[in-house]
Amino acid sequence: MARRMRPTSGPLDARSRAILQAVIDDYVTTASPVGSQTLVERYSLGVSSATVRGILADLEGAGLLTHPHTSAGRIPTDAGYRTYVESIVELGAPPPAVEQLMIRHQFGQVEFASEQWFRLAATTLASMTRSAGLATAAKPVAARVRRIDLVAIQDRLASLILVLREGTIKQGLIALDVPVTQADLTRVANLLNERLAELTAADIVTILPRFERALGGDAESRNLTRKIAERIIRTVAEFDALRVEEVYSDGLLNVMEAPEFAQSEKLRRVFTALENRAYLADLIAVVTETGRIHVFIGRENAPAEMGEVSLVLAPYGQAGRAVGVVGVLGPTRMAYAQAIGTVGFISGLMNELVDHLYA
Amino acid sequence: MARRMRPTSGPLDARSRAILQAVIDDYVTTASPVGSQTLVERYSLGVSSATVRGILADLEGAGLLTHPHTSAGRIPTDAGYRTYVESIVELGAPPPAVEQLMIRHQFGQVEFASEQWFRLAATTLASMTRSAGLATAAKPVAARVRRIDLVAIQDRLASLILVLREGTIKQGLIALDVPVTQADLTRVANLLNERLAELTAADIVTILPRFERALGGDAESRNLTRKIAERIIRTVAEFDALRVEEVYSDGLLNVMEAPEFAQSEKLRRVFTALENRAYLADLIAVVTETGRIHVFIGRENAPAEMGEVSLVLAPYGQAGRAVGVVGVLGPTRMAYAQAIGTVGFISGLMNELVDHLYA
DNA sequence: CGTTAGCACTCTGGCATGGAGAGTGCTAAC
DNA sequence: GTTAGCACTCTCCATGCCAGAGTGCTAACG
């Protein structure tokens, strides 16, 4: 029974909050339970260790801290991190201006190629937060065809290259009934580009009959064109149906450095959980729908394997057009303020980049 | 001093080889040192444990086995694995016919898209050998342009899409001095496709002056064409200069399961060493030059961090045209026969696929 | 002369033991 | 409400010990 019983859900007074914060700060850097003595030594709290002990007991009563065992220091619970995060989520700690400039410069360096952006985003997040960086491609609600190209591979084999408006490139092989030349294919591609540019899969389905009627030439050429148009529809529709296209990640090794993952088994479970597309899709859906930075702490994550890691995720892009998610994954014992600030900055940057595609 | 001193480099008699093989087989599956008793129990050697002990001592004298400590069983040394591998490298243990069929089927499923092949190769190798699977893209000696496409992004911004003969797609953004329409770009692209198809960067440099003279149209259009042609040259040349394009990997998690990597620090070092492009490039060079399956065991690997892992690598593709490498990475305590067989099979399969590109 | 049984020897791994150290919770005094 | 003091608890680490596994040697055997 703590001396002064505090309602479990009541707001914390300033001093309690300061001490909670001190515990978290210390634990995040040292990774070992922190005692009352250490707190008064390292943080100028202006009270004695006995007083701090009282407050620690209260915080534990409120479920924000816990004890690994009787005579160890305190460590934050998931709820403790949660209240801490709530108190800083508004601002976070964006990277220093110099670093922001450097990163902008790096993004300027990679020539337009969306894949490169996502890779770079993941890499940058990883190196800045010393955690794992994650980035998904910007996925449009309904993809639009920007450009169609056909390349002859063999007599009866052609490669279809489909550039979508968001920069995604889809490629597929088409087996042909009759031999065709590159010239034939180029003619068809030009025709398709003329008629199908900026259309969605649904649009193409609608205009297809009209388009076919307008088609001159011989039966063979008409067949070829129809076959390719149908393939385009299928490819685009398949892309639309995909809930998660691709997740770029970097710095998973950084997470291995954390002492809580010294024995690799735990980490392996985490990686395995991350391969679950459905889980990722759900996460992404939550984040993109609300449009804000989200922090998922420890057991708040649905899969039990993710119970010891936290995710900081932010959406980017334009609702209704194309959206993606960037973020970091680290141990629950994570520098949340910095992570939130960094993820916020990178998502802002990605926003700007995506905007350019629609300018 | 062993009873019968054996010359360190002399060939092993049949019984010694059988026992070496038994030690390796047992150690590969159990991961714990194997004693003379265990050997006679599990493998029908037809002799007593004392005799086996004598032979074990000889093998240790020859540097093929070692002792973790006085009273533990034997474990193979790198040299032990090496002699073992030499004795099986000719045949390996190719996957059973059923599995071969299944894999062929899977490769048939993915439509032509080289990236997918490499991913699939890495994934297949990983799941079959329960180790990490590796695959590099087939890298041509001098890439040839197969197809050029230009897509208008904004008034003065175009995206260049370059399809190379091996299926690689390169994409880059081009800033333009004057506003252009998609129609302008299409015209230029058609022209370039006509003149530059199947050429290398060097070829294009040679014909560029002639090509420019032949160019009609106004100055603006000529400028645009030249600018794009130069960009194509640069892009292709940069691709040629790359020693390692991209390494696809899968199943790194499998390696984490091995008890020798229970504490993650070691494994982290391995991963870090693998990020060293120069090292990879050297490896690939060795493998592609000789054109055979290569096994790099433990300390045979140049980087000290790779001292506890082995690589089984095989080239694929056509020398002088395009070559790549597939293989697996696992602990030195690895099922070499199976790994060699599997890698051999997959590289053969990749050979067939690449051949199709040149058919 | 190779093979085998027997035996002494060695080293690890697991387990119990016993402080030292860290940190708590309580209480009484300020 | 805050603080000093103190008894108490629990981990961590070093130590010592024992059982088990496996070796290397030797003497006997076919």
Image: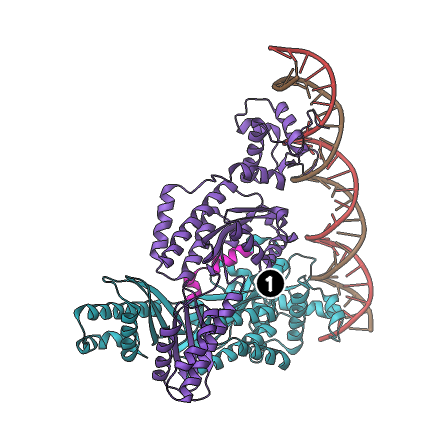
Chain colours: A cyan, B purple, C brown, D red
Is residue A113 among what the camera can see? no
Q: Main secondary structure of the magenta part?
A: helix
Q: Is residue B283 magenta?
A: no
Q: Quadrant of residue A30?
A: bottom right
Span colored in magenta? A267-281
What type is the residue that disc 1 sits on?
Answer: Asn
The subunit letter for the residue under badge 1 reads A
**Residue B291 rendering spot, x and y as whole percentages:** 50, 49
Total numbered circles: 1
In the image, taking residue A171 as reference, residue B3 lies left or right, namely right
In the image, taking residue C22 as reference, residue A318 lies left or right, namely left
**Residue A213 rendering spot, x and y as whole percentages:** 17, 76
Q: Which residue is label 1 attached to?
A: A254
Q: Secondary structure at mark 1?
A: helix
Residue at screen point 51% across, 77% down:
A347
**Residue B294 rendering spot, x and y as whole percentages:** 53, 47
Is residue B55 among what the camera can see? yes
Name the one closer to the observer, B127 or C27.
B127
> Measured along the vertical axis of the image, is residue A75 above or below residue C18?
below
Locate the N terminus of chain B by quadrant.
top right
**Residue B16 rendering spot, x and y as whole percentages:** 59, 29
Name the one closer to the observer, A273 or B130.
B130
